[in-house]
């Protein structure tokens, strides 16, 4: 009971406004609890189309949805933008950069971290494609490589700028390889007429037996068949096994 005589209701803190967190909070709308949704961003990201942001096919705002708007009409749901740093299980609080938030129950839906499958050098040097904040630097890097290559006379130096290696032949790797090939060999080469398609290489490195390993063998075969016709290595998307 509060000082004003209101009956206190249990507080459910949902950490993460991704698919898991949003659906958990939505399930509690109009229920007999107060819900607090926390996310380090004030938007929900639709990750399935993140590769299109990285390949300049979509703007970030096309795949970001304000979390407060999603719960605008939910009287028992509040939203706060805060980075969660830890849980204090004894005090039953969620610790954030903006202070501690008490909970009766907590839902942790903070997603996952990129996996590099021990690919040498990938963790240190690659651009991960996991969060919105990853997509923009990756896109800018691609554009800057074209810019750098177009100013050079040395053919091999140009090729080095124009060789793009994608680590991982899962869904995102395959999708991004295709979108990157389309971006470079479509609009970008029109903007850089001195760059030849033969100088561009999009290489996919996959340690497993096939790309799209979590899908059917038919899907894997289809993905490989759909490689651009300019072949392995130069100017196309290729699948290579990483060194033993
Ligand atoms: C590039 C990419 C493409 C994908 N494509 C597909 C697809 O085509 N089809 C499909 O079914 N699935 C796809 N997935 C997988 C799908 O996006 C995930 O399964 C799904 O997002 C998992 O939901 P989640 O709620 O567990 O985590 P997420 O959606 O990752 O959400 C986690 C949330 O937690 C927040 N968060 C994390 N840490 C903190 C913290 N410390 N403090 C505060 N907030 C925090 C994040 O900001 C984020 O909003 C893709 C994933 C990626 C990365």
Image (cartoon, grey):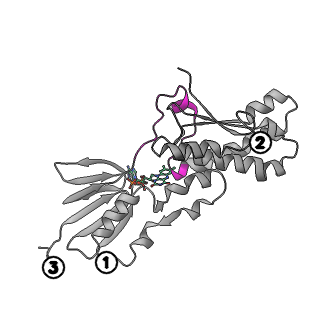
Task: Determine if the magenta segment contains residue 6.
Answer: no
Q: Is residue 69 left or right of residue 124?
A: left
Which residue is found at the position 32% from the left and 66% from the top? 25
Task: Determine if the magenta segment contains residue 118.
Answer: yes
Q: Position of residue 61 (x, y in %)?
A: 58, 63
Alpha carbon separation for disc pair 1 and 2: 51 Å
**Label 3 secondary element:** loop
Of 59 and 2, which appears nearest the observer?
59
Q: Is residue 229 left or right of residue 244?
A: right
Alpha carbon separation for disc pair 3 and 1: 19 Å
Residue 212 higher or lower than 55, as above or below: above
Task: Please tell me in which quadrant of the rendered image residue 141 appears.
Answer: top right
Which residue is found at the position 36% from the left and 58% from the top? 20
**Label 1 secondary element:** loop
Of 147 and 185, which appears nearest the observer?
185
Mark toward the viewer: 2 or 3: 2
Q: Which mark is residue 146?
A: 2
Tell me which segment is drawn in magenta: 112-133
* Residue 129 in view (yes/no): no
Dominant secondary structure, magenta: loop
Q: Earlier in the sequence, mark 3 or mark 1?
A: 3
Which residue is found at the position 36% from the left and 56% from the top? 98
Assess disc 2: are there few (<14), some (14-19) or many (≥20) residues with their C-alpha within 10 Å of its C-alpha.
many
- Which residue, given by chain and number where applicable, does mark 1 sit on? 75
Q: Earlier in the sequence, mark 2 or mark 3?
A: 3
Which residue is found at the position 52% from the left and 36% from the top? 210
Q: Position of residue 110 (x, y in %)?
A: 37, 51
The reply to whether the C-beta atoms of the residues labelled 2 and 3 are less than 8 Å apart is: no
């Amino acid at each position: 009971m509060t000082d004003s005589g209101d009956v206190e209701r249990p507080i459910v803190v949902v950490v993460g406004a991704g698919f898991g967190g949003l659906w958990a909070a939505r399930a509690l709308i109009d229920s007999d609890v107060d819900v607090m949704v926390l996310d380090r961003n004030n938007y929900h990201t639709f990750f399935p189309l993140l590769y299109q942001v990285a390949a300049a096919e979509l703007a970030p705002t096309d795949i970001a949805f304000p979390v407060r708007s999603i719960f605008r009409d939910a009287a028992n749901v509040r939203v706060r933008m805060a980075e969660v740093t830890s849980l204090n299980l004894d005090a039953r609080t969620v610790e954030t950069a903006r202070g501690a938030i008490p909970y009766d129950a907590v839902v942790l839906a903070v997603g996952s971290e990129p996996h590099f499958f021990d690919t040498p050098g990938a963790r240190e040097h690659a651009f991960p494609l996991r969060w919105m904040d990853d997509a923009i630097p990756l896109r800018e890097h691609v554009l800057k490589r074209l810019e750098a290559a177009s100013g050079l006379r040395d053919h091999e130096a140009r090729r080095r700028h124009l060789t793009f290696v994608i680590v991982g032949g899962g869904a995102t790797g395959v999708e991004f390889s295709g979108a990157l090939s389309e971006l470079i060999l479509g609009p970008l080469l029109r903007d850089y007429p001195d760059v030849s398609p033969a100088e561009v290489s999009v290489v996919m490195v996959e340690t497993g037996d096939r790309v799209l390993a979590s899908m059917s063998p038919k899907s894997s075969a289809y993905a490989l068949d759909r490689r651009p016709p300019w072949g392995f290595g130069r100017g196309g998307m290729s699948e290579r096994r990483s060194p033993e």
